[in-house]
Image (cartoon, rainbow, N blue to C red):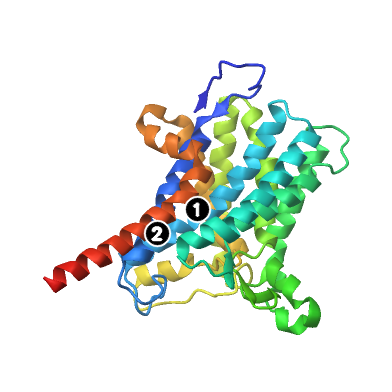
Amino acid sequence: MVLESKNQNQDRIPRIISIDILRGLVMVLMTLDHVRGFFSNTNFNPLDLTHSNIPLFLTRWITHLCAPTFIFLAGIGAYLSLKRGKTKQQLSQFLLLRGCWFIFLDLTVVRLSWRFDLSNIFSAAGVLWAIGCSMIFLAAIIYLPTRTILAIELRSAGAIGILLIVGHNLFDNVQAEQLGNIGWLWAILHQRTMIEPISGFRLFILYPLIPWIGVMALGYAFGTLFEMEKYRRLQLLRKIGLGTIVTFIIIRATNIYGDPNSWSIQSSFPDTLLSFIDCHKYPPSLLYLLITLGLAILLLYYFEKSNIRYFKPLIILGQQPLFFYVIHVYLIHLTAILEIVCKGNIKRR
């Protein structure tokens, strides 16, 4: 659904409300996942089929939509801001500064929300880190040589995104330890591991960058769909979303490429299905991104067709994502502490 803007000089392309709704939805899913993490008494991975059950598995699996959707939509937003009047130089400067700001927030303010510990000996490079670094990369590739503003440039960004997403699993067997002094760089790019960039300070690379950079570049190219007439856009959203999921099923069924973890036949059909859809997130495999981005694109298709009045709370969340992201873990963490204190007082009584 597209909401017409009153300021036509500023918004040459109207605000895309379906994007706000989708972003708001994944914010809710993300929050539910983090609430489960703070309040659940399970001491195992919900995706571990040897211990988990179907409802618990799905509460974790559905949150896989969050990070790919955030980063994909950030790429779309970058393209739309260019078409709303920003020059390439203005967009590049914005992406560079915004990316640095996201990285700073992730390693400081967001870090503190997870660990109420003021010491600076440990931090984790999470989703804001991945978004920030991807923005910095995108700030450079929007300058790629073009023949026409709407063709070669976007094919270049899209091709880079596809190359990074499809090809990075070729290097799954390369380990940082094998690369000697430059192993830290490989960890940042492709391996979930701990590094020590400064003596006494450890940085856990939770979100290795290569595939996430590809997702944002692909989102930038995907933004062209929102310049199209609505009927044509809906057709493409449906075809691309379904085609992406079918591609996932075909490649996953072969068990040859696209994910470092093979699926296997389980004791029951539901468990076999769960094994089939359980793909590698850190870093996100080709198959992980195919299933999550395919679902995200189909949700965009659905929200484009829907009446926005049913989704107003999601629109509000989706229009203020950074603010909500920064504060939500603080609120959950403080609530968890309050629960512990209250339980302790009740026991003492």
* Mark 1, other Cα within 10 Å: few <14 / some 14–19 / many ≥20: many
Q: Is 17 or 163 nearer to us in this picture? A: 17
The structure residue drawn at horizontal position 32% and vertical position 62%, both measured from the top left corner, is 336
Q: Tell me whether the residue at label 1 lies in contact with that at label 2, contact meaning CB atoms closer than 8 angstroms.
A: yes
Residue 314 falls in image quadrant: top left
Judge from the rendering whether residue 99 lies leftward or rightward of residue 321; answer left or right.
right
Q: Is 307 or 74 nearer to us in this picture? A: 74
Q: Is residue 174 above or below residue 269?
A: below
x, y percent for residue 71 = 60, 49
Amino acid type at mark 2:
Asp
- Residue furthest to the left: 349
x, y percent for residue 196 = 67, 76
Judge from the rendering whether residue 234 lies leftward or rightward of residue 9; answer left or right.
left
- Find disc 2 in the rendering and name its residue: 33
The structure residue drawn at horizontal position 50% and vertical position 61%, both measured from the top left corner, is 112
* Mark 2, other Cα within 10 Å: few <14 / some 14–19 / many ≥20: some
x, y percent for residue 81 = 67, 32
- Find disc 1 in the rendering and name its residue: 66
Q: Secondary structure at mark 1?
A: helix
The structure residue drawn at horizontal position 32% and vertical position 73%, both measured from the top left corner, is 42
The structure residue drawn at horizontal position 65% and vertical position 21%, both measured from the top left corner, is 10
- Dot label at residue 55: none
Q: Secondary structure at mark 2?
A: helix
x, y percent for residue 49 = 39, 75
Q: Earlier in the sequence, mark 1 or mark 2?
A: 2
Residue 188 falls in image quadrant: bottom right
